[in-house]
Amino acid sequence: MKKILTLTILSLFAFAANAQEFTLTSTDLQGQLTTKQVFSGFGCTGDNISPQLAWINAPEGTKSYAITLYDPDAPTGSGWWHWVMFNIPNSTSELKANAGNLESGLAPSGSVQSITSFGQQGFGGACPPEGDKPHAYIFTVYALDIEKIDLQPNAPPAMVGYFLNAHALAKASIISYYGR
């Protein structure tokens, strides 16, 4: 009996070790943001183009996804939300570059891009204060256990974040840096 129990436990560890991890990747992000991902406005002169993002190995039971971009280094006491997109269908596994531009038509059908800390919908690129140390920009994809978050596009990032954390099966992130 002891031998069977030991073999069972070992096989469970082997299975867990081989499980594929939920992963976020990007062909556009190489550790440092470029002027493509820098905000156009607020004193910054970038192109304000959201990067290409792709994810693999979503957990079983995933019904939708969400994407956020957050700068924890912003001198606000609470960070800065640069992008919040939710209600991304579970059939989606990639966002093309510029999907964060509401006028591009590249966002998945049915998805919602709510307001950012800039006070507008869609992607708002990096724009740290001049002379500040480079800021970390955290792109996160959430695999959610619900098909739809019933919030309007004017929902503040904290409200969306509440639902993301309440319904996340898994999340994966990429961190890139930018300073000026």
Image (cartoon, rainbow, N blue to C red):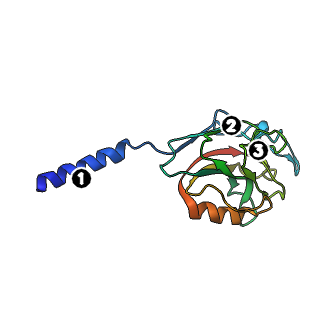
Callout 2: 10 Å neighbours few (<14), some, many (20+)?
A: some
Along the line of sight, the residue nearer the viewer: 24 or 33: 24
Residue type highlighted by circle 3: Gly
Three-letter amino acid code at the position of disc 1: Ile
Say whether residue 138 is visible. Answer: no
Mark 2 / mark 1, whichever is N-terminal: 1
Residue 78: x and y in percent read 71, 65
Q: Is residue 110 in sight in this rendering?
A: yes
Q: How many marks?
A: 3
Q: Can you identify the residue that label 2 sits on?
A: 52
Quarter occupied by residue 93: top right
Is residue 146 rendered to the left or right of residue 126?
left
Which residue in the structure is indicated by mark 1? 9
Q: CB of mark 2 within 8 Å of CB of mark 1?
A: no
Q: Position of residue 26 (x, y in %)?
A: 63, 36
**Which element carries disc 1, helix, strand or loop?**
helix
Residue that carries the numbered disc 3 in the rendered image: 100
Q: Which residue: 73% across, 36% down?
A: 97
Q: Residue at x 80, y 39 (%)?
A: 105
For marks 2 and 1, give the CA distance. Answer: 41 Å
* Left or right of 5, for residue 173: right
Q: Are the residues at dot 3 and dot 1 in contact (C-beta closer than 8 Å)?
A: no
- Horizontal side of 168 relative to 133 (left or right) equals left
Q: Position of residue 113 (x, y in %)?
A: 76, 52
Real-space Cα separation, disc 3 to disc 1, in angstroms:
46 Å
Dot placed on the residue nearer the N-terminal end, 2 or 3: 2
- Around disc 3, counting alpha carbons within 10 Å, would you say few (fewer than 14), some (14 to 19), or many (20 or more)? many
In which quadrant of the rendered image does the N terminus lie?
A: bottom left
Quarter that holds the C terminus? top right
